[in-house]
Image (cartoon, rainbow, N blue to C red):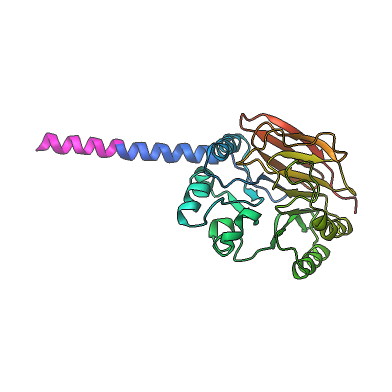
Amino acid sequence: MTRKICFLTVCLLCAIFTIASARAARGLRDSKRVVTPDKFSFAVIGDTGTGKSGQLDVAHVMETVYEKEPFELVLMLGDNIYGGVNSHAFRKRFEQPYHNLIARDVQFQAVLGNHDKGGVKREVGYDPFNMAGNRYYTFTRGLSEGGAPLAQFFALDSSKMGNEQLAWLEKELAESRAIWKIPFFHHPIYSSGRAHGSNLKLRANLEPLFARYGVQVALSGHDHIYERIKPQQGIIYFVSGSGGKLRKGGIRRKDPIFAAGNDETCHFMLFEVEANEMRFRAIDINGVAIDQGVISPPSH
């Protein structure tokens, strides 16, 4: 009996040591995540919700990059859940692929895409998407030296861009004191994608507001490619729609608006934001930067 008790005691101590070591190791990894008010990083994914290899490959490389360059926020550009929207779909097409990032308190912020239309109520009310029941909303990150927000994000529902949403957006843009104003939405108003391309009606509604109120960067998905558009009225548009699906050969590279792009691999984007510049990279499933650059803030 005594020998049995000793054996059980040793096993218990080993288990405790293993758990403590795992926690310590995780704490060591997470200790590299340094968050300061005057700078932050965020990732961008679009058209992700398949639960298949493309999404899983991107999720894996996001985790790998996070280990060296932690980011606190992920923007989701729509088509978050393909197929029926239910608890099983949320688990398979969101919670399982991004489990390790969610466990490290990385915050996801979603907008709706055309493939989300069958589950709008479920998605806007799904806590991990942080939409708080709203089809469109805004939030800020960071602080500048003067106390103004470093960045303000404007999450838009590009499937239902009516007068009410446009009036809300103009009001929020006009009142924003942020150095960086960053709208993100599903349907691109500039795209060289062969499948969808530029949404001209949406452009007519949004571009005048973006130009008037000093937007410098806008993000969208929908076309299953990566593309950076040549600056339009001083605004740089990105299409980041291959976070889970890829349309190979999907770019019209002779399009006059095309600056850089990739239609050979799935990807995600990583942005590093400071008051005087914003650095960006598009990163493929092998961890290779397929595009990168630096953006200066608006002059006013």
Q: Which residues are magenta?
A: 1-14
Indicate whether residue 9 is drawn in magenta: yes
Would residue 151 be found to the left or right of residue 286 on screen? right
- Counting every numbered tag in the picture gives 0
Could you tell me which residue is drawn at 23 percent across and 35 percent down? 10
Could you tell me which residue is drawn at 68 percent across and 33 percent down? 248
Quarter in which the C terminus is drawn: bottom right
Choose top left, top right, bottom left or bottom right for residue 286: top right
Indicate whether residue 12 is drawn in magenta: yes
Most common SS among magenta residues = helix
Would residue 38 be found to the left or right of residue 299 on screen? left
Report if residue 143 is visible in the image.
no
- In this view, which residue lies farthest toward the left? 1
Residue 229 locus on image (x, y percent)? 82, 41
Could you tell me which residue is drawn at 50 percent across and 45 percent down? 99
**Nearest the eye: 137 or 12:** 137
Quarter in which the N terminus is drawn: top left
Residue 33 locus on image (x, y percent)? 60, 42
Would residue 108 be found to the left or right of residue 28 on screen? right
**Nearest the eye: 269 or 246:** 246
Residue 139 locus on image (x, y percent)? 69, 60
- In this view, which residue lies farthest toward the front? 195
Residue 50 locus on image (x, y percent)? 55, 45
Choose top left, top right, bottom left or bottom right for residue 244: top right
Report if residue 122 is visible in the image.
yes
